[in-house]
Image: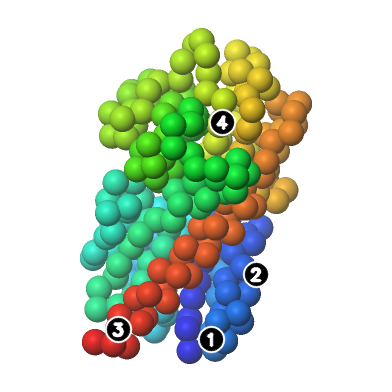
Amino acid sequence: MMKLALIGDPVEHSASPSLQRGFLEEAAIDGDYLVIRVPSGDGGRTIRRLREDGFTGCNVTYPLKEEAFDACEALTEEARRAQAVNTIFFGRQTLGTITDGIGARTAIEALLDEPVALKRIGVLGYGATARAILAELHDTDAYTFVWGRDSDRVRAACHLFEARPWPPENPPEIVVSTLPPEVRLPEELIGQLRAADLVMDANYGPRAVLGRQLGREVLSGDAMLEAQARASFDFWLAHLDRVANN
């Protein structure tokens, strides 16, 4: 049986259970996907308990992605670059990766119906999700820009991923917001986002409220979530196959 879980806080709103249970059914795999509310500070302890309880793997959401990074014994290159983990496989070692970047890129390319290479893409934020997206976009030759209130963290993200600080003139045409739903943006940025060709909110469902603040259409993160969930499921299957063949 494939035992999977989602940990984080909040988790009650998450669409991951329905997606992952659908993937299990599609693959004709006997398994289940549980949702476990885990507050900040309890991530490492919970991950160790899931391993001891025989779970195959887990997804990790806010605010535990950095805690999950620290709890893993082995990491993929994607996780190392983002310094965060949203997907764990319990094999010989506790192996962590992050699929937020590929989820965002897949969603954007589906909307554009073309690759992101050479596109000008802005990322709002510099947390775990933003870093994963910046790393993925760097690898696909997009031109990236970072906005955030903390100039030191903006500079650090730009240095890591060869991005640029948000330009006061000629802002990017495509924007992905990784900011929390309740954030209030400065008026100058709101005006720039209203003029962008495409704005996507990494939040999804009822938490995708950025469009109300901007007064324009904003694509929710539903497509991004589905793509990153699929990447997580494929990651678990690939490593299960390796274990079975060794």
**Which residue is label 3 attached to?**
243
Q: Residues within 10 Å of mark 2 (few under 14, many from 20)?
A: few
Q: Is residue 131 above or below residue 167?
A: below
What residue appears at the point 31 percent right and 30 percent down from the top-left corner? 162
- Looking at the rendered structure, which numbered label has been put on residue 29? 1
Spatial separation of the CA atoms under disc 1 and disc 3: 16 Å
Q: Nearer the viewer, mark 3 or mark 2?
A: 3
Q: Earlier in the sequence, mark 1 or mark 3?
A: 1
Spatial separation of the CA atoms under disc 4 and disc 3: 41 Å
Q: Earlier in the sequence, mark 1 or mark 2?
A: 2
Snapshot quadrant of residue 90: bottom left
Tag 1 secondary structure:
loop
Tag 2 secondary structure:
helix
Q: Amino acid at mark 3?
A: Val
**Which residue is label 2 attached to?**
18
Q: Is residue 40 above or below residue 57?
A: above
Looking at the rendering, in which quadrant would you find the C terminus? bottom left
**Which residue is label 4 attached to?**
174
Spatial separation of the CA atoms under disc 3 and disc 2: 26 Å
Task: Please give left or right for residue 144 compared with residue 30 in the image.
Answer: left
Q: Would you say residue 4 is visible in this rendering?
A: yes
Q: Earlier in the sequence, mark 3 or mark 2?
A: 2
Q: Nearer the viewer, mark 4 or mark 3?
A: 4
Tag 4 secondary structure:
strand
Q: Earlier in the sequence, mark 4 or mark 3?
A: 4
